[in-house]
Amino acid sequence: MNVYFDNAATTQLDPEVLKEMMNVLENKHGNPSSIHSYGRQAKAMVEKARKKIATHLNVSPSEIFFTSGGTEADNMAILSTVEDYNIKHIISSQLEHHAVLHSIENLVHKGKVTVSHVALKKDGHIDLADLENQLKKHQSSLVSLMHANNEIGNILPIEEVSELCKKNNAVFHSDTVQSMCHYPLDLQKIKVDFIAASAHKFHGPKGTGFIYINGSRNISPQIHGGGQERNMRGGTENVAGIMGLSKAFETAYKHMKEHAEHIQHRKSHMIHRLETELKDVEFNGDTKGNSLYTVLNVMLPETDDYEMMLMKLDMSGIAASAGSACSSGSNIGSHVIAALGKNIDRRPVIRFSFSKYNTIAEADFCVETLQSFYSSNAKAPVKAKAAN
Ligand SMILES: Cc1ncc(COP(=O)(O)O)c(C=O)c1O
């Protein structure tokens, strides 16, 4: 059985998305910047896609800019805001994706900003009282806090955070890569300045995403070129990718409730079987509270042979993500699990992440594969790499 439980890393392309993209690739090769009919047709498609996304997010199409994905959108929000708003301090968290963490580190390294990390609660949620204190201390700063964590699934109370930022005159960026198209976002209610999205996390193509820039904010581009995206992002538009993104977006919104129930059911089933059938299983993050229904981060029982366990999953056809803090103090390991400060010595940490395509039989097969491993294991240290 082949089981793909790594949907937070990337998802399978929806066949309808592929169909849409193939139609563009085969029949609509115009450059949106050309003024002839081919170009106008391509331009019209890109603008239709922009409008569709804007409508679902309850914003103006002029606030959506297509990018090469989440990383570019995160970089643009952070780097451009620091330059254009003369930001001297960034408030963020240790749980951010590397697209945010490394962008900020780079600015700190160049001496352009200082950074402070918001305190975390035991379950990995942001301590809002600490955020408020930091906002008061560092007025007019940039806040970058992700909406949903890609490793442990915790969800930020984004509306509350946006109010705090507004009250303290801070610019607010939120990486919504993992929550986009899994939860409805009404950007008239959430007072956010920038959000980042990536199509390949919701059954769209890789290398396509977008940034939302609140109309009241004025930032300059990071990529200069032919004036595309209303002078905000140079480079010929990835028309097929944008059409794939738009189709994936539309499909996800149309079936959001039904997919959420389907996926949550698989996740709950897996939690139940792991809890009842394997000794000493723990979950990282707020698994049963405010957490992504797509992500389950499991701390498995101690084992002598961690590498063998990963190999067993892989050889059994199960794709999941290994992410654990490194107990030996080297820098291999997940910064997210490390930030939670858990003692994971000799305990494998695995992220299972689900999609609409997963079945109960797959969850059962996965639990049974783990059971079969634990019925014959020995002890060894845990080392693994951070998840995407
Ligand atoms: C939370 C988060 N932010 C940003 C990214 C980067 O997105 P992309 O792969 O489109 O560059 C990812 C992808 O792993 C992610 O999970």
Image (tube, helix red, strand yellow):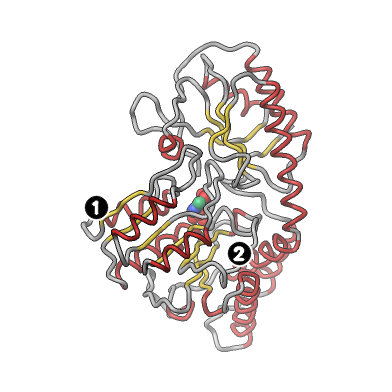
Q: Can you say whether 138 is above or below 27 in the image?
A: above
Q: Is mark 1 within 8 Å of ligand 1?
A: no
Label 1: how many Cα within 10 Å (few below 14, some 14–19, many 20+): few
Q: Which residue is mark 2?
A: 185
| Residue corresponding to mark 1 | 109
Q: Is residue 63 left or right of residue 222?
A: right
Q: How many numbered dots are placed on residues in this image?
A: 2
Is 203 displayed left or right of 69 in the figure?
Answer: right
Q: CA distance from mark 2 to mark 1?
A: 34 Å
Instruction: Give the quarter of the image for residue 241.
Output: bottom right
Q: Secondary structure at mark 2?
A: loop
Label 2 CA crowd tier, 10 Å (few <14, some 14–19, many 20+): some
Could you tell me the amino acid type at mark 2? Leu
Residue 179 in picture, x, y percent from top left? 59, 55
- Residue 153's spot in the image, x, y percent? 56, 45
Q: Amino acid at mark 1?
A: His
Using the image, determine if residue 257 lies above or below residue 55.
Answer: above
How far across and down, in percent of the image, does residue 345 sit?
A: 45, 21
Where residue 299 sits, quadrant-wise, is top right
Q: Is residue 250 left or right of residue 387?
A: right
Above or below, 7 relative to 371: below
SS of the residue under disc 1:
helix
Residue under the point 55% across and 62% down: 208
Q: Residue furthest left?
A: 111
Q: Earlier in the sequence, mark 2 or mark 1?
A: 1
Q: Residue at x 72, y 51 (%)?
A: 260
Q: Does the residue tagged 2 have its C-beta within 8 Å of any atom of ligand 1? A: no
Residue 246's tag is: none
Position of residue 279 measured from the top left corner of the image (x, y, whole percent):
63, 18
Depth check, mark 2 against mark 1: the one in front is 2
